């Protein structure tokens, strides 16, 4: 009986330890706030033309505003609404891509993201975060996919705006995003 109790206590301690570690990692990722340095990452990106020849490395985009738009899954109704709104308001929200890099981040694979970008004529990149590393760093990852989180990163690499969740059905969300992108760009 003593061995059984010892084994049970050991297993319980291991589970509690693993749970505590997982909670700490989630808390660390979810404590990002405006003014923090954005976690650096490198990820494969695609456009309607295909896989970009060079992976997207956040640190290499210093000097421009970067918008990370995490979303659950390509071609689903909410995600389509969000990405079509970005496309249709690209000039106003993202200054037509002048000194602003919009990256839609999904756990989807490159082929599905390329096809969607091509079919819907999206003028921005998608990141294929299949291992969820970027989503985990920004607190957007779940077991299946990413939550609809949005981060605006200023030219110095600091987080300038956070929307968790980003409310893709609200016109006010796009107005606030446009203002955040403009404000971030003026901090150069």
Image (cartoon, rainbow, N blue to C red):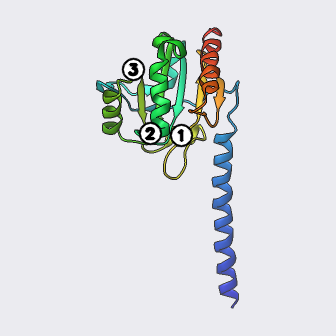
Instruction: State the residue at coordinates (64%, 41%).
Output: 29
Q: Are marks 2 and 1 in contact (CB under 8 Å)?
A: yes
Rounded to the nearest whole Å, what is the CA distance between mark 2 and mark 1? Answer: 7 Å
65 or 10: nearer the viewer: 65
Residue drawn at 59 percent across, 37 percent down: 138
- Mark 3 or 1, which is nearer the eye? 3
Looking at the figure, which quarter contains the N terminus? bottom right
Question: Pointer 3: what residue?
Answer: 123
Q: Secondary structure at mark 3?
A: loop
Whichever of callouts 3 and 1 sits on the residue coming sooner in the sequence is: 3
Residue 147 position (above or below residue 150): below
Vertical arrangement, residue 128 with respect to residue 158, above or below = below
Q: Secondary structure at mark 2?
A: loop
* Circle 2 Cα neighbour tier, 10 Å, few/some/many (<14 / 14–19 / ≥20): many
Residue 6 visible somewhere in the drawing: yes
Residue beneath label 2, please? 129
The image's mark for residue 135 is: 1
15 on left or right of 133: right
The percent coordinates of residue 153 (x first, y second) are 59, 22
167 horizontally vs 111: left or right? right
* Badge 1 element: helix
**Inter-mark Cα distance, 3 to 2:** 19 Å
Residue 48: x %, y % from top left: 32, 25
Q: Position of residue 104 (x, y in %)?
A: 47, 30
Residue at 45%, 38% in the rendered image = 106
Q: Could you tell which of marks 3 and 2 lies nearer the N-terminus? A: 3
Q: Quadrant of the C terminus?
A: top right
Q: CA distance from mark 3 to mark 1?
A: 22 Å
């Amino acid at each position: 009986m003593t061995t059984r109790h010892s084994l049970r206590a050991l297993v319980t301690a291991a589970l509690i330890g693993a749970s505590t570690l997982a909670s700490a990692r989630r808390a660390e990722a979810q404590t990002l706030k405006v003014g923090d340095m954005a976690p650096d990452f490198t990820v494969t990106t695609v456009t309607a033309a295909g896989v970009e020849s060079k992976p997207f490395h956040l640190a290499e985009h210093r000097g421009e505003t970067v918008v990370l738009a995490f979303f659950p899954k390509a071609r689903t109704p909410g995600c389509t609404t969000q990405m079509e709104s970005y496309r249709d308001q690209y000039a106003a929200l993202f200054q037509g891509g002048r000194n602003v890099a919009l990256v839609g981040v999904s756990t989807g694979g490159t082929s599905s993201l390329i096809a969607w970008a091509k079919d819907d004529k999206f003028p921005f990149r998608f990141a294929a975060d299949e291992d969820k590393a970027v989503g985990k760093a920004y607190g957007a990852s779940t077991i299946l996919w990413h939550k609809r989180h949005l981060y605006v990163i200023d030219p110095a690499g600091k987080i300038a705006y956070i929307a968790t969740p980003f409310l893709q059905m609200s016109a006010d969300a796009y107005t606030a995003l446009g203002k955040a992108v403009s404000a971030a760009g003026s901090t150069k």
